[in-house]
Amino acid sequence: MPSLYTEVEINAPRRRVWRVLYHKELWMYWNTFLYDCDPSQTFAEGHKVLLALRRVPGEDETEFQPQVTLVQPNVCLHWVSSIPGFTNQHSFELQDIGGDRTKYIHHEHFSGKFTRLFLPFIRQDEYQGIRRMAWELKRYTEQL
């Protein structure tokens, strides 16, 4: 299954990183990759949320409605979004690495019969987007 992966060490306790990541209404202050389209929809297992993404700065936002599949406070958040023939699974994980430092891991897995068609067109931009998000999360959280 094709995937993308990025990680960054954040000089902040895991609880603080979780608060910034989980509370999507804060994204407007730091996140230029993912956008919250409906603050009334919280991350809860089994529920859908309306989000948008911008892989490359300046491009139009693409709305999507993923279903949250796992929420473990201060540990991980997972969701899955799909269109017929193409599925994208996101996982955000936080690992305590000691000394009030946290490793943030963002993983995406792609599947479906149209993966070979879509992935070549979005892979590089999607990778740049998840890396940008990781560094923005780091900068914002470390300033709090």
Image (spheres, helix red, strand yellow):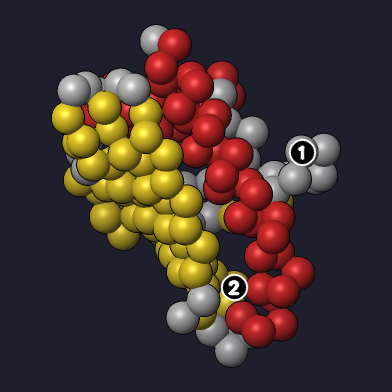
Instruction: Find residue 118 and name its label.
Output: none
In the figure, residue 72 lies in which quadrant? top left
Q: Position of residue 108 (x, y in %)?
A: 47, 62
Of the 4 image quadrants, the one containing the C terminus is top left
* Label 2 close to label 1 by CB (< 8 Å): no
Secondary structure at badge 1 equals loop
Of mark 2 and mark 1, the one earlier in the sequence is 1
Where does label 1 land, which residue? 57
Q: Position of residue 16 (x, y in %)?
A: 29, 22
Is residue 44 at all visible to an observer of this figure?
Answer: no
Q: How many marks?
A: 2
Identity, as a three-letter code, of the amino acid under mark 1:
Pro
How far separated are the C-alphas under marks 2 and 1? 24 Å
From the viewer's side, name the closer residue of 37 and 22.
22
Is residue 60 at all visible to an observer of this figure?
Answer: yes
From the viewer's side, name the closer residue of 120 and 58.
120
In the figure, residue 97 lies in which quadrant? top left
Q: Residue at x 61, y 81 (%)?
A: 115
Judged by depth in the image, the label closer to the viewer, 2 or 1, is 1
Instruction: Find residue 83 and name its label.
Output: 2
In the picture provided, is 76 more to the left or to the right than 37? left
Q: Residue at x 36, y 41 (%)?
A: 104
Secondary structure at badge 2 equals strand
Residue most extreme to the bottom? 113
Q: Is residue 126 above or below residue 82?
A: above
Q: Residue at x 76, y 69 (%)?
A: 121
Q: Residue at x 44, y 11 (%)?
A: 143
Identity, as a three-letter code, of the amino acid under mark 2:
Ile
Q: Is residue 21 above or below residue 131?
A: above
